[in-house]
Amino acid sequence: MIAAHNPAARNPLAALWWVPRGIIFGLMAFFIFGPLFNLLLWTVAEKWYFPHSLPLEYGFSSWARVFAPRGGAMESLTNSLVVALLTVVVSLLLAIPAGYALARLKLPFRGLILLAFLIPQAFPNLTVYVNVARIFYEIRLNGTIPGVVLVHVSHGLVYAVWIATAAFSAIDAELEQAARNIGAGAFRAFLDVTLPLAAPGLMASAIFVFLESLDEFTGSYFVGAPDVNMLPLLLYTTAAGGNYQIASITALLLLVPSLVFMLIVERFLKADVLSRVGH
Amino acid sequence: MPIIPPNGRTMPKRFLGLLLVLPALAVIAFLFILPLIMSAVGAFQVEGTFGWGNFTKTFDLYTKDIIFTVMIVSLSTVLIGIASIAIGGYLTLGEHPVAVAILRWLYRWPMFIPFIVVGQILRTFLSKNGMMNNTFINLGLLTPLDAVSFLDWRGIVIAFVWKQTPFVALLVAGAMASINRDTIEAARNLGASRLRLLLEIVVPQVAMTLTVGLILSFVTMMSVLSVPLMINAQSPTMLTADIAFRVNSYGDYGVANALGLISLVLAASVAWIYLRASLKERA
């Protein structure tokens, strides 16, 4: 590598550095993509048993079973999507006013309030969910969709509030002032000027909350199961039952939105918003 | 200037601000802080009276698992730290643009993959007849008789490192990118090797970011239930699996809460070590 740096960069020996690089990158790629490729194989494996290192027959019969009307997977998929969408709606309804206030208005203990939303991420939360399930059992929210949504909201609020705050503080306050000066009310100015400008940032926070809800396992396990079945729970029960095909298809359904988001996150989360997260 | 609400009355800004934040704060208070307090109180409750009963029972049954959890999470944290310094360091100091670009593209993939999916895919990958052993056997690096399953403590450590390294590496690489390049160039001109540059100049400047990332990872790993359930649910296992077992099989909330409080204390002590170190640094 030193050879590549000094002026004799065209030294033919520099090419030799690709040997260690190739080995290290190859190993990394094997350990990162190997498990993912293995998952893909399982989703289309009809027959695969020891000692064969590749499936003996390929086919889509497991897919047909997952998406069959009474396969159970459709119910989990619908539940997961309904819960995730409701979680996004509730989180944004809570986070937009909170984010606006944290970004624009003078608040006492502003730093502490921002930190408070981090609490659910900063403590081991398993024991909390156990006790939430007990509270919900008393007020008959256990095993219901609203119960699961509330648990997911408490967990996703940190993304919603922090990104919403950053999105609002990245917008020039004078634009809203200008609307006020030509006679718009505070609410009107917010709705017509500030909110549309903050939309990309809010969109990013919505996606974060959506994924957080889609992937959440522990809260759904204690509050939802066995009445409200969700995709992560289906993945767990099918995997525990040894049905690797169904488990792998479920895993793929959970995986794809996450990977797509990783590829597009930079479009929604611009650097000016990103640099303000947590401030 | 005061904000004028739609109904035309003037409201002090502070009051309005608090009002807007209040609903979101209430959710955290009722759905997180209240249950957290319940768990702390419940840990000391034995059949209606207060006492240490749950803790004696917990230490009788689960001392091994407590040590197991601490060892696994600590080892994973150390490995994540080393791997993210290596990745961040190469992204910052690497001189071949193509190699840097390959690494930048490669390392991030596991970051957004949910823990439950990580558990599932590593379970099939690391098992005795899994793809990892099969590949090594086909390459002639391993004989079928020597193949062992990695689905024990090693599987949990691999799963944690696999999933958490990109997150910490992303934070560390970001911090390294914003270091003043002049000190690096100066040391390089004096003939410092790249390893020395990394360890003596770059890492000390990003120590704060690295620690924050590692503490967040430590807490996350302490609370993940799906990975131990999917990879290694036999004894010894992690405290999260024990809590779930205690609640689901026995309805024993006392011991579950005591275990929860212990994992809380473990996580808090790590944060406390960090706070003390950073205060000492500033003094």
Image: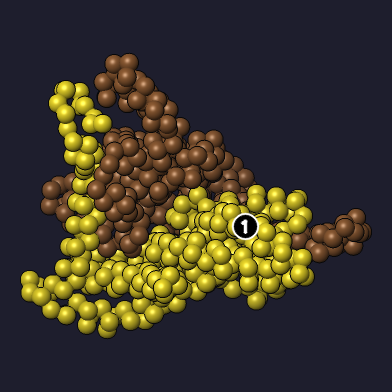
Chain colours: A brown, B yellow
The residue under the point 23% across, 31% down is B2
Q: Determine the residue located farthest toward the left in the rendered image.
A: B48
The residue under the point 26% across, 70% down is B261
One can see residue B220 in this view: yes
Side of A39 relative to B72 (left or right): right
Quadrant in the rendering for residue B131: bottom right
- Badge 1 amino acid: Asn
- B128 w.r.t. A80: above or below: below
Which residue is nearer to you in this view: B226 or B5?
A: B5
The residue under the point 16% across, 22% down is B8
Which residue is nearer to you in this view: A197 or A243?
A: A197
Quadrant in the rendering for residue A208: top left
Q: Residues within 10 Å of mark 1 (few under 14, many from 20)?
A: few
Which residue is nearer to you in this view: A48 or B205?
A: B205
Q: Determine the residue located farthest toward the top in the rendered image.
A: A182
The residue labelled by disc 1 is B180
Callout 1: chain: B
Residue B88 horizontal/vertical position (percent)? 61, 59
One can see residue B229 in this view: no
Residue B253 horizontal/vertical position (percent)? 20, 67
- B147 w.r.t. A258: above or below: below
Quadrant in the rendering for residue B270: bottom left
Task: Report helix, strand or loop for mark 1.
Answer: loop
